[in-house]
Image: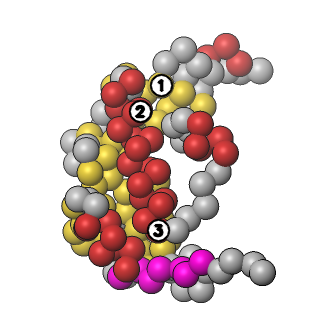
Amino acid sequence: MAKTTKVPTFDEVLATLGGEKFDVSPAAEGSNRAAGAYRVSKNGCAAEMAPSSEKNAPVRLLTKGGWVLGGEIARIVDRGYQKFLKTSKLEIPATADHLRALHGFNEQLKEAAGAMELYNEALGTTSDRYDYDRVKGR
Protein backbone atom coordinates (compact mmCIF):
# COMPACT_ATOMS: atom_id res chain seq x y z
CA MET A 1 0.00 0.00 0.00
CA ALA A 2 1.35 3.43 -0.94
CA LYS A 3 2.18 5.75 1.90
CA THR A 4 0.58 9.18 1.69
CA THR A 5 2.18 12.23 3.22
CA LYS A 6 0.26 15.19 4.55
CA VAL A 7 1.04 18.41 2.69
CA PRO A 8 1.33 21.24 5.23
CA THR A 9 -0.59 24.48 4.74
CA PHE A 10 1.23 27.79 4.37
CA ASP A 11 0.39 28.76 7.97
CA GLU A 12 1.69 25.40 9.23
CA VAL A 13 4.95 25.95 7.33
CA LEU A 14 5.34 29.40 8.93
CA ALA A 15 4.62 27.93 12.38
CA THR A 16 7.17 25.15 11.83
CA LEU A 17 9.81 27.66 10.72
CA GLY A 18 9.07 29.85 13.74
CA GLY A 19 9.44 26.79 15.99
CA GLU A 20 12.84 26.07 14.42
CA LYS A 21 14.09 29.57 15.41
CA PHE A 22 13.68 31.18 12.01
CA ASP A 23 12.80 34.88 12.02
CA VAL A 24 9.50 35.15 10.16
CA SER A 25 8.31 38.63 9.14
CA PRO A 26 6.20 40.16 6.37
CA ALA A 27 8.28 40.84 3.23
CA ALA A 28 9.00 44.39 2.15
CA GLU A 29 7.02 45.71 -0.78
CA GLY A 30 8.68 45.47 -4.16
CA SER A 31 8.18 44.72 -7.83
CA ASN A 32 8.01 40.91 -7.57
CA ARG A 33 6.13 40.63 -4.28
CA ALA A 34 2.97 38.63 -3.96
CA ALA A 35 0.16 39.20 -1.51
CA GLY A 36 0.87 37.62 1.86
CA ALA A 37 4.61 37.26 1.25
CA TYR A 38 6.94 36.56 4.18
CA ARG A 39 10.69 36.81 4.65
CA VAL A 40 12.27 33.99 6.67
CA SER A 41 15.82 34.31 7.94
CA LYS A 42 18.29 32.49 10.13
CA ASN A 43 22.08 32.56 10.64
CA GLY A 44 22.63 35.41 8.17
CA CYS A 45 20.59 33.76 5.38
CA ALA A 46 17.12 34.67 4.14
CA ALA A 47 14.45 33.75 1.58
CA GLU A 48 11.05 35.14 0.66
CA MET A 49 7.95 32.99 0.27
CA ALA A 50 4.26 33.41 -0.40
CA PRO A 51 1.19 31.17 -0.37
CA SER A 52 0.70 29.18 -3.55
CA SER A 53 -2.55 28.31 -5.25
CA GLU A 54 -1.32 24.79 -6.07
CA LYS A 55 -2.74 22.02 -3.92
CA ASN A 56 0.45 19.90 -3.76
CA ALA A 57 2.78 22.84 -3.02
CA PRO A 58 1.35 25.37 -0.55
CA VAL A 59 4.54 27.48 -0.53
CA ARG A 60 5.95 29.43 -3.47
CA LEU A 61 9.51 30.72 -3.10
CA LEU A 62 9.73 34.27 -4.43
CA THR A 63 13.48 34.43 -3.86
CA LYS A 64 15.80 31.50 -3.43
CA GLY A 65 17.67 31.35 -0.13
CA GLY A 66 20.75 33.56 -0.03
CA TRP A 67 23.18 35.34 2.28
CA VAL A 68 21.99 38.77 3.46
CA LEU A 69 24.31 41.65 2.48
CA GLY A 70 23.24 45.22 3.21
CA GLY A 71 19.62 44.16 3.69
CA GLU A 72 19.44 42.42 0.28
CA ILE A 73 19.45 38.69 -0.37
CA ALA A 74 22.64 37.96 -2.31
CA ARG A 75 22.86 35.56 -5.26
CA ILE A 76 25.75 33.13 -5.67
CA VAL A 77 27.87 33.73 -8.78
CA ASP A 78 30.37 31.02 -9.72
CA ARG A 79 33.33 32.25 -11.74
CA GLY A 80 35.04 28.87 -12.01
CA TYR A 81 37.82 29.64 -9.55
CA GLN A 82 35.72 31.25 -6.79
CA LYS A 83 32.11 31.71 -5.74
CA PHE A 84 30.92 35.25 -4.99
CA LEU A 85 27.94 36.70 -3.13
CA LYS A 86 26.42 39.45 -5.27
CA THR A 87 23.68 42.01 -4.65
CA SER A 88 22.71 45.01 -6.77
CA LYS A 89 25.26 47.16 -4.91
CA LEU A 90 27.86 44.83 -3.43
CA GLU A 91 29.91 41.76 -4.34
CA ILE A 92 32.17 39.80 -1.98
CA PRO A 93 33.98 36.44 -2.20
CA ALA A 94 31.97 33.63 -0.60
CA THR A 95 33.74 31.78 2.20
CA ALA A 96 33.23 28.16 3.22
CA ASP A 97 31.31 29.41 6.28
CA HIS A 98 28.91 31.39 4.06
CA LEU A 99 28.25 28.37 1.86
CA ARG A 100 27.84 25.96 4.81
CA ALA A 101 25.32 28.28 6.49
CA LEU A 102 23.44 28.76 3.22
CA HIS A 103 23.30 25.02 2.50
CA GLY A 104 21.96 24.29 6.00
CA PHE A 105 19.41 27.11 5.70
CA ASN A 106 18.08 25.79 2.38
CA GLU A 107 17.84 22.22 3.71
CA GLN A 108 15.85 23.31 6.78
CA LEU A 109 13.61 25.55 4.68
CA LYS A 110 12.78 22.78 2.19
CA GLU A 111 12.18 20.25 4.96
CA ALA A 112 9.72 22.56 6.73
CA ALA A 113 7.92 23.37 3.48
CA GLY A 114 7.72 19.72 2.44
CA ALA A 115 9.53 20.51 -0.82
CA MET A 116 11.41 17.94 -2.87
CA GLU A 117 15.18 17.78 -2.30
CA LEU A 118 17.08 17.33 -5.55
CA TYR A 119 20.22 15.19 -5.68
CA ASN A 120 22.59 17.91 -6.90
CA GLU A 121 21.31 20.35 -4.26
CA ALA A 122 21.74 17.76 -1.52
CA LEU A 123 25.42 17.39 -2.40
CA GLY A 124 26.21 21.04 -1.77
CA THR A 125 25.38 24.63 -2.52
CA THR A 126 24.42 25.33 -6.12
CA SER A 127 25.10 28.68 -7.81
CA ASP A 128 22.52 31.01 -9.30
CA ARG A 129 24.78 32.07 -12.16
CA TYR A 130 27.94 30.66 -13.75
CA ASP A 131 30.40 33.14 -15.30
CA TYR A 132 33.48 31.31 -16.49
CA ASP A 133 35.99 33.79 -17.87
CA ARG A 134 37.76 31.22 -20.05
CA VAL A 135 34.66 30.57 -22.13
CA LYS A 136 33.55 34.20 -22.33
CA GLY A 137 33.12 35.32 -25.94
CA ARG A 138 33.11 31.82 -27.45
Does label 3 or label 1 sit earlier along the sequence?
1
Q: Mark 3 sits on what residue? A: 113
Secondary structure at badge 3 equals helix
Name the residue rendered at 36%, 23% in the picture. 95
For the record, the magenta segment spans 5-11
> 53 or 125, which is in the foreground?
125
Q: Is residue 40 rendered magenta in the image?
A: no
Residue 99 has which mark?
2
Q: From this view, report whether residue 115 is shown above or below residue 4.
A: above
Q: Main secondary structure of the magenta part?
A: loop
Name the spot of residue 38 as percent of width and height, x first: 31, 70
**Residue pushed farthest front?**
1
Q: Residue type at mark 3: give it.
A: Ala
Q: Is residue 8 rendered magenta in the image?
A: yes
Q: Is residue 39 visible?
A: no
Residues packed near mark 2 inside 10 Å, few (<14), some (14 to 19) or many (20 plus): some
Secondary structure at badge 2 equals helix
Q: CA distance from mark 2 to mark 3?
A: 21 Å
Query: CB atoms at circles 1 and 2 under 8 Å apart?
Result: yes
Q: From this view, report whether residue 88 is shown above or below residue 2.
A: above
Residue 56 has which mark?
none
Q: CA distance from mark 3 to mark 1?
A: 27 Å
Q: Mark 1 sits on what residue? A: 83
Give the position of the N terminus as an image quadrant.
bottom right
Q: From this view, report whether residue 64 is shown above or below residue 13.
A: above
Name the spot of residue 88 as percent of width and height, x first: 35, 42
Name the spot of residue 103 as percent of width and height, x first: 44, 41
Does label 2 or label 3 sit earlier along the sequence?
2
